[in-house]
Image (tube, rainbow, N blue to C red):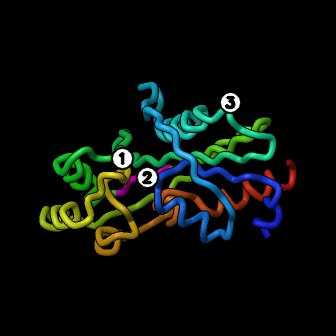
Amino acid sequence: MLKEKLKNHRLILASGSPRRQEFFKNLGLDFEIQLKPVKEEYPPRLTHFEISNYLAQLKALAFKDELQPKDILITSDTIVWHNNTALGKPRDNQKAFNILKSLSNATHEVITSVCFTTITYTKTLYSITKVTFKELSDDEINYYIKNYQPFDKAGAYGIQEWIGQIGVTKIEGSYFNVMGLPVHLVYKTLNAIAETT
């Protein structure tokens, strides 16, 4: 399968996210994790998937002078888009509360962009999932923040955690995309790269 096709390549996942790392393990792939500090800032003119595309590509730029001929670098970024605003990772309890309060009884979009980079090839793709929450009480929001500390998650929540289980009423699109990686698209793209490099 894909692992066999990629046996002559070195797969580099530039992500500290344990969820993304788990996805790659579940695909049965050999990969290594390399992290470089990147200031995740983007031009204010960008909106929607342009933001996550830009940030995924920005993370790849940090590696541009180091890639070897058989390397495949994968970088990604996830944002939550709601009321024409990109919701990033909350800095503190109050920010997390405000974000979750805004998502309560509403539908938002989770956008994950993935950038694939080799020394001769760059491809960026994105996936959009619509997520609807029930009306969340202040007690439910505070309980979640206190017990799950969602400060490393765009939109201040992890769908696989308690808040997703009790709060999400509808999903349109890939569930795994909301967790941080559109695995079906990654699998498809890596197959295509393996067959052409």
- Tag in front: 1 or 3: 3
Magenta segment: 107-111
Write the residue at 55% across / 40% down.
56
Return the disc, 2 or 3, that comes first in the chain's sequence.
3
- Mark 1 or 3 closer to N-term? 3
> Dot 3: within a 10 Å radius of its alpha carbon, few (fewer than 14), some, or many (20 or more) residues?
few
**Number of disc labels:** 3
User: Which residue corresponds to the image point at 36% horizontal and 53% vertical from the top-left?
Assistant: 153
Q: Which mark is residue 82?
A: 1
Q: Quadrant of residue 148?
A: bottom left
User: Which residue lies at the image location 57% right of the left edge and 47% below the top edge?
Assistant: 34
Say whether residue 144 is visible: yes
Question: Percent x, y for residue 106?
Answer: 31, 57
Of marks 2 and 3, the one in the foreground? 3
Instruction: Tell me whether circle 1 and circle 3 mark residues in contact (CB < 8 Å).
Output: no
| Residue 113 appears in the picture as rendered | no
For the residues labelled 2 and 3, the Cα–Cα distance comes to: 34 Å
The image's mark for residue 65 is 3
Q: Nearer the viewer, residue 104 or 16?
A: 16
Secondary structure category for the residue under label 1: strand
Which amino acid type is marked by label 1?
His
* Residue on which the image places disc 2: 109
Quadrant holding the N terminus:
bottom right
Please, what is the three-letter code of the amino acid marked with disc 3? Asp
Residue 110 shown in magenta: yes
